[in-house]
Amino acid sequence: MPAKLFFIPLLIALILTGCSKSEPAAVAVAPSGPRTIEITAGDNMKYSLTRIEAASGEALHVTLTNTGALPKEVMGHDWILLRAGADAEAYSRAAIAAKDTNYQPPSLAFEVLASISLLGPGQTGDVTFNAPVQPGEYPFLCSFPAHCQSGMQGVLVVR
């Protein structure tokens, strides 16, 4: 019986260290997932973050939280990422007439790369996407009327 007790720890040690010195031990690596970017917006019509830098093709997870207290109908916030070269001001002007589609004009949908829908006070929305492969500057904005014009916009810079 004591001989069996001696072999059990020896067997465990062999299993833990491996039987061959020529093969490296396997190491499990969990995928890191997308990088999270948290943005807040309140009744002051400003994003907490107006510049995001990303590597070409990097996986991003953007979270927007409306920290304001005013109702969605008068102070809703969204986050719209446009293609490089798109005119954020022109998108915002077109959005004024798009109340039925939460201020996202269907005629300019081809310019949108990613978006978070209109949020009321205390609400959080998110979107996961890959940064464009082409380096450049990609504008983002809040499309609620007058918000972009008051400075609620920014840029995703892809390196």
Image: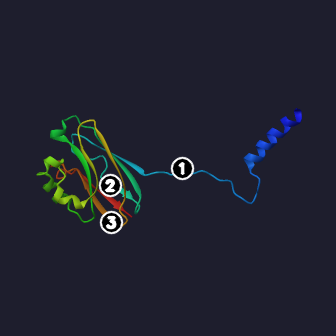
* Crowd around label 3: few <14 · some 14–19 · many ≥20 (10 Å): some
| Quarter placement of the N terminus | top right
| Residue 55 image-quadrant placement | bottom left
Label 2 residue SS: strand
Q: Is residue 135 left or right of residue 84?
A: right
Q: Nearer the viewer, residue 73 or 67?
A: 73
Comes first in the chain, label 2 or label 3: 2
* Crowd around label 1: few <14 · some 14–19 · many ≥20 (10 Å): few
Q: Which percent across, then down, holds residue 114?
A: 30, 55
Q: Residue at point 14% right, 51% down?
A: 98
Q: Which mark is residue 136?
A: 3
Q: Which percent across, then down, holds residue 81?
A: 28, 56
Q: Specify the farthest residue to the top.
A: 1
The amino acid on which the numbered mark 2 sits, given as a three-letter code, is: Arg
Q: Which percent across, then down, holds residue 123?
A: 28, 38
Q: Specify the farthest residue to the left.
A: 97
Give the residue at mark 1.
30
- Distance from disc 1 to disc 3, alpha carbons, whole Å, reads 31 Å
Q: Is residue 19 left or right of residue 118?
A: right
Comes first in the chain, label 2 or label 1: 1
Give the residue at mark 2.
51
Label 3 residue SS: strand
Q: Which percent across, then down, holds residue 131?
A: 37, 59
The amino acid on which the numbered mark 1 sits, given as a three-letter code, is: Ala
Query: Is residue 46 in sight in this rendering?
Result: no
* Crowd around label 2: few <14 · some 14–19 · many ≥20 (10 Å): some
Q: Which mark is residue 48?
A: none
The amino acid on which the numbered mark 3 sits, given as a three-letter code, is: Gly
Q: Is residue 75 left or right of residue 132?
A: left
| Quarter placement of the C terminus | bottom left
